[in-house]
Amino acid sequence: MNSSGTPSSPSNNPVGAAAAPVVIATRESRLALWQAEHVKALLEQRFGLAVSLLGMTTQGDQILDRALSKVGGKGLFVKELETALQEKRADLAVHSLKDVPMDLPAGFVLAAVMEREDPRDAFVSPRYADLASLPQGACVGTSSLRRVVMLRALRPDLRIEPLRGNLDTRLRKLDDGLYDAIVLAAAGLKRLGLADRIRAVFDTDQMLPAAGQGALGLEIREDDSRLGTVLQALVHTPTWLAVHAERAVSRTLGGSCSMPLAAHAHWQGSELQLSAALGHPGQPQAPLLRVALQRGITDALAAEALGRQAAQAVLDQGGRAYLEVATGTT
């Protein structure tokens, strides 16, 4: 990584610099294993490395009867993996980037972000074609406060019920008739070959994605420069810069599971368009605060500056009062 935060060009022989076997720490859900296997195959095929997986069950996987916002947030999905890195039982952790806290613990670094899959949210239902087709009072499942607030803005008549568990568990609950529809990340369904379960995809104007949604983040120990050099070759620079902007919005606003916050950036030519939205966590009738900014971006520092600008614009619209409710400081 160079001083601007933009990935440097990989060296001529990164493999030789990291020839020791690589152990990837991963959650044991089917989607997490797919993601880890995907990175494993790339490291084996492109660099000839010996790679193995260390499957782990995290606190986030074990606690299914309470909302994440009540038990510690999305960081519960990465804590055990970071412990394995710290204890050198693993060298690399593969994460869904939207589950990675905005500030990593000391000693860890996000070494690479790979090319993003579809970042949008998907409408999944066995009976209804899209959100507009749902009858009044229909039951929709999600445990994301972001999705709850945006669904209520689109259809205040719906009954929105909590939905926890891995992707297969959520689909099974839907098929068992517990919900009329559920909302999931399109990326996970597509990665597992389940795109046919998607009845409709929400336009980002309707439902803005979470920061980092659809992207894979590769976390290593900060002092593992040899593996870091190898992983630079896996960085997808357009995604890398876009998620830096998105995560800067969330970091600036103190984003957490208790805050219905969205941030999504996409490229228009050489310019990055960043949209952010903040909902009121306790008053569903309160307006969504939305901002959109567009700038020419060439490195991560500029992307993060754009994210901070967008966060400030949200605050200028009255976002501070929303945040005080979310953090319990009122």
Image (spheres, grey):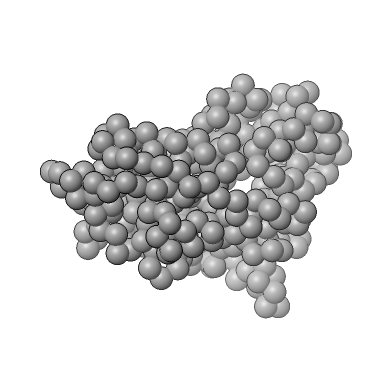
Is residue 85 or residue 158 the one in the foreground? 85
Total numbered circles: 0
Q: Position of residue 165 (x, y in %)?
A: 69, 45
Residue occupying the point 71% across, 24% down: 129
Instruction: Give the residue at the far right of this rendering.
Output: 137
Q: Is residue 170 above or below residue 286?
A: above
Q: Is residue 25 above or below residue 136?
A: below
Q: Position of residue 130 (x, y in %)?
A: 70, 28
Kindly indicate the quadrant of the structure image that contains residue 289. Answer: bottom right
Looking at the figure, which quarter contains the N terminus? Answer: bottom left
Regarding residue 59, the answer to whether it shows in the image is: yes
176 displayed left or right of 307: right
Regarding residue 313, the answer to whether it shows in the image is: no
Instruction: Give the residue at the far bottom of this rendering.
Output: 329
Residue occupying the point 31% across, 35% down: 44
Residue occupying the point 77% across, 36% down: 173
171 displayed left or right of 105: right
Is residue 290 or residue 43 the one in the foreground? 43
Q: Is residue 131 above or below residue 72?
A: above
Is residue 52 or residue 202 the one in the foreground? 52
Q: Position of residue 36 (x, y in %)?
A: 46, 41
